[in-house]
Amino acid sequence: LPAAAAGEASPVGKVLQLLSDLQTKIISEGEEAAKTYTAFSEWCEERSKNVAYEIKTGKAEVAELKASIAAETAAISSLDAKLEDLAASTATNEADLKAASAIREREAKDFAASEKELSEIIDTLQRAIGILEREMQKTGSASFAQLQSASSVAEALGVLVQAATLSAADA
């Protein structure tokens, strides 16, 4: 036993013991590194799958967005064309409105002048009829035929004035 105890305490025994401990430690660290490597490898593989899926999804999304952009570009072109048509139509309508307003203004002035003239004529005729009626009453000796004739003249003048009014309104 003392020799065995002495062998254990010898420097070679200590070196063997240290090598044995080092071997156990290295094996343990190797197993730990293998576990870490396996976990890291699995994480890398999972991450690679996720990135590949994201790339695939991104490419599909890019294709959809390109199609959407093309459709919206076509819609914009169509709406631009409609806008140009509406602008041209609006300009035409404004020009037509301006022309119609000018015509209406001119016709309103013509009508006002005709109406004033016809009103003056009607007033003159009414005064003339009044004068004729007074004169007829003064000369009680007027015959029935003369009275009818004066009445016919007044009616004819009234019809003439109305016809002139209608003609002026039609113009």
Image: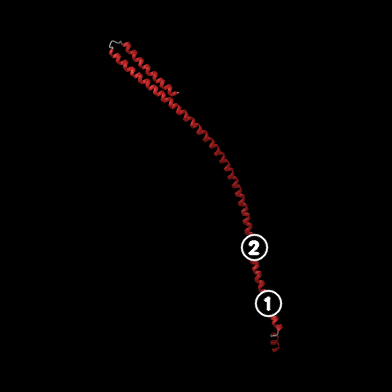
Rendering coords of residue 30 (x, y %): 67, 72
Q: Amino acid at mark 2?
A: Cys
- Residue closest to the eye, 24 or 80: 80
Q: Residue at the spot x=43%, y=22% of the render? A: 168
- Residue 22: assigned label: 1
Q: Is residue 50 left or right of residue 102?
A: right
In the rendered image, the residue lying farthest to the right is: 12
Q: Is residue 22 left or right of residue 103?
A: right
The local crowd at label 2, few if under 14, some if 14 to 19, many if 20 or more residues have their Cα within 10 Å, is few
Rendering coords of residue 4 (x, y %): 70, 87
Q: CA distance from mark 1 to mark 2?
A: 31 Å
- Which residue is the site of mark 2? 44
Q: Is residue 63 left or right of residue 170?
A: right
What is the quadrant of residue 58 in the picture? bottom right
- Kindly state the secondary structure of the residue where label 2 is placed: helix
Image position of 94 with respect to 18: above or below = above
Q: Residue at the spot x=59%, y=47% of the render? A: 69
Count of numbered circles on the image: 2
The local crowd at label 1, few if under 14, some if 14 to 19, many if 20 or more residues have their Cα within 10 Å, is few
- Kindly state the secondary structure of the residue where label 1 is placed: helix
Rendering coords of residue 81 (x, y %): 57, 39
Q: Amino acid at mark 1?
A: Leu
Q: Earlier in the sequence, mark 1 or mark 2?
A: 1
What is the quadrant of residue 47 in the picture? bottom right
